[in-house]
Amino acid sequence: MSAPTALVFRAEDSSTTVRTARWWKKYRFWLLCAVAFVVLSLLGIIMGSGGKSTTGTLSITNPAPAGAQGAASVLRNQGVEVTATASLAETAAALRSNGHGNSTVLFYDPRNLLSRTQAADLAAAVADSGGKLVALSPSPLTVKALSAELSSVGTTAGTPAADAQCTNPDAVAAGTIDGGAPDLDVSATSVTMPLKLFKGTENCFAEASKNPATGGYLAYNSTGDVAALGNPGIIINQNLASRGNAALTFRLLGSTPKLLWYTASLKDIPVSEQPPALSDFTPEWIFPASLWLLLVGILAMVWRGRRHGPLVTEPLPVVVKASETLAGRARLYQNARALDTASATLRHATMTRLSHALRLGQTAAPHAVVDAVTTLTGHTRAHVHDLLLGPAPTTEKDMLSMAVELTALEEEVAQR
Amino acid sequence: MAISGRFFFLALAALVPIIALPGPVTWLLAVAVLALILIVDTVLAASPRKVALQRSLPSGVRLGEPATALLRLANESPRMLRGQVKDGWQPSAGAANALQTLEIRPGERAALSITLRPSRRGDLHTEHVSIRSFGPLGMAARQTTISAPGTLRVLPPFNSKRHLPSKLRKLRELDGRAAVQIRGAGTEFDSLRDYVRGDDVRSIDWRATARRQDVVVRTWRPERDRRVVIVLDTSRTSAARIEDETALDTGIEASLLLAVLAERGGDRVSLIAYDRRVRAKVSSTGKGNMLNAMVQALAPLEPELIELNTADIPRQVRDVTAHRALVVLVTSLDAGAAEEGLIPLAATLAQRHVVVVAAVRDPAVDAAHLDRSSTTAAYRAAAAEHALNRRSAITAVLKQSGVEVVDAAPEDLPPQLADRYIKLKAAGRL
């Protein structure tokens, strides 16, 4: 086994190309996995962000119950050009480019982002372009700004249905619309929208048993160009097919060749009113320094983590503790509460040792051993007999005391 | 490719300009400087692939003793090699300084001495040497791994050697002992000498006495040139760990002591390590150093997880010797099916040979069978009594068929087996 001292080891004499090829072969699988992961993630992001559907309430690209994709696509099929806009400026520009009298603007501002001035600007822009404005659930101040003739008269819990109760042709054509309160046959998870009542020159769809003059779900100004709809729930996908909802929706929104679907967004907030960013409070160097520390952290991992050569394996031979079988048998006895087996084994062992100590031979009769022990120790014969040949103990406590007595007896005999 | 701590701290220091002059330009400049240093240092480093390696390893080392492995490196590149060299010994070789730093000028050589403290018997391997070569700035390094296999054979410790002097003295005392006490079938006639008071009158050689005028007695010496065959069981039962060594290790210790003793006693020793095939086979019929041949053969033995093929052992013994011999079976008495394995085997062998069964006894069982301190301990005691009972039954059956049994704790087994050999020799039963 003496090492051959003449043997010289050298690095394999191979070119860089060969080594690169080998490296590629070795890590090919993981590299391809990584590439596939990155590509799939990117695809997911692109699909997620660039996809058609969104989740906003009353969004024309939302196919969910709360969306309005149904209304928008029906209008498109009827030849109305539906365009979604997200800011006042955008809407105004679209109005200008659409030309005079071609546009209807649906205005929806669920978060009350527009100020009164902006609302007034919107109304003016619509009026300038000769279009129509349909405001969905505008706030009381906004509705005032949109048209001085309109006003909000509060909210309501709603009724199952609401009748037109006015002479406006659109409302009359629709007849009855949903009153906003969930129908009995609609599941509890269905979408409910807030209900508002408005009052204008002409009020339609007043609640049953109330005077239409006090306000309804739909209110028009005197020219009929500005309408406030207090029950936008009729437009969403879930309710569009119910009662006269569709008729009212399409007549309200589809009367001009172009529809601007304006949902107010954060873009409508003036820049000065936006909350300050975190970067305004931190020093300028924080970001580059953190990024650098990240880089340094990666360097530290490379520094400490690079191994000196591949791992070395240790072939381990199998080794079993010899007393495992003993421990296993003991646990089996205990789990099975094998009192009779255990005590019989203990007694038999003691008996064997006693007969050996008393020189009675391997084949001595048990009674002979009992007699010999009685004579030698002076215990009563009954006691010794019970201990060595009596009935098996019935409790663990008895077995333990018996086991202790057996060793004591052995010691006693051994000492004499 | 690897970087040093120096490079890391340089990168950390670059934080100062980045904080002082925040901005993307500073950041990118810092990255560029670091990248430049990295590239320059890597390019200027000596190629670790242009290193020639030579190993010189000791031929064998006893377990528990340190060894030194030499690794010679020759720098064949035209640049200075500043590097870290790691010898890839397996962990149980106990290489304390496997990673060393060194500098070799172009075309020169260096030697690393690596101290090994093996913690396992057997063949310990090193597969490769990794060389990390730093550039002149000590920032970045090139690394390569050169395959350079080496093997160190770690021999059994033979701790039972300490019993050897006393046993040899006992063996020598057999020579020239009063004849009658040891008279037996096989004792050999040694010489005649004058009668001294105290000699047994039965050993007087009357014919010689008649030729001379003095009373002459015969003396005897123990027989020589007997065969001792040690069969070492390497099957699954030898994997049992008793105290802090496996049954196989204890068996090796006992076999070595017995073999050395028997060889000094003038007998011819053969050793077979066997489970289902022969793992090692040594005979003293050859020349010279029996002990060395034995430790070399026994060193790589490991317990195999297979059942002992008892039916084939008589044939193996017959292969070694055609004559009557002392057959020592170093095995286990706990074997699940001793009735089918060990007992028939020993009985078969006992018809032709003198058979000794040597087995390791677990002191844990002896300790457990009298411990009755709790209910759990009582159950354990019952289990231990069961094991002992079974063991003594096997022993009794073996003794009935004329087989000697040596059943002792790991540290006692080698001397007790040696004693049994001396006893048999003294009785002339070999």
Image: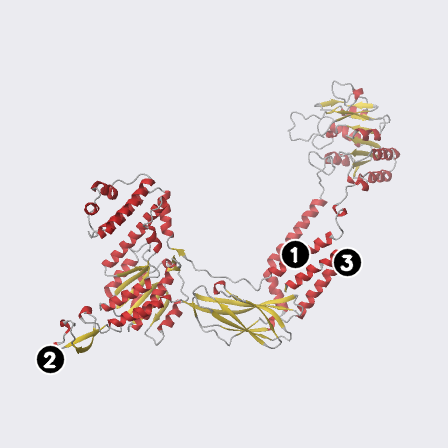
Query: How far apart are the alpha carbons under marks 2 and 3?
Result: 124 Å
How many other residues sit within 10 Å of disc 1, few (<14), some (14-19) or many (≥20)? some
> Closer to the camera: disc 2 or disc 1?
2
Residue visible at 77% across and 58% down in the picture = B25
Horizontal side, residue A285 vs residue B292: left or right? right
How many other residues sit within 10 Å of disc 3, few (<14), some (14-19) or many (≥20)? few
Q: Amino acid at mark 3?
A: Val
Q: Amino acid at mark 2?
A: Ala
B131, A403: nearer the viewer: A403
CB under 8 Å between discs 2 and 1: no
> Under tag 1, what secondary structure?
helix
Query: Mark 1 = which residue?
Result: A297
Q: Amino acid at mark 1?
A: Gly
Query: Mark 3 = which residue?
Result: B25
Query: Mark 2 = which residue?
Result: B210
Residue visible at 24% across and 49% down in the picture = A413
Q: Tell me whether marks 2 and 3 sit on the same chain.
A: yes
Indicate which disc, 2 or 3, sits on the residue closer to the N terminus: 3
B403, B7: nearer the viewer: B7
Question: Which subunit holds the residue at mark 1?
Answer: A
Question: Which subunit holds the residue at mark 3?
Answer: B
Image quadrant where residue A235 sits: top right
The correct choice, above or below, for B93 with respect to B214 in the image is above
The correct choice, above or below, for B204 with respect to A66 in the image is below
Rendered location of residue B170, percent (x, y): 27, 69
Horizontal side, residue B214 vs residue A165: left or right? left
| Residue B320 visible, this angle | no
Image quadrant where residue A301 sits: bottom right
Question: Which subunit holds the residue at mark 2?
Answer: B
Which residue in the rendered view is the most extreme toward the bottom? B212
Query: How far apart are the alpha carbons under marks 2 and 1?
Result: 105 Å
Horizontal side, residue B217 vs residue B231: left or right? left
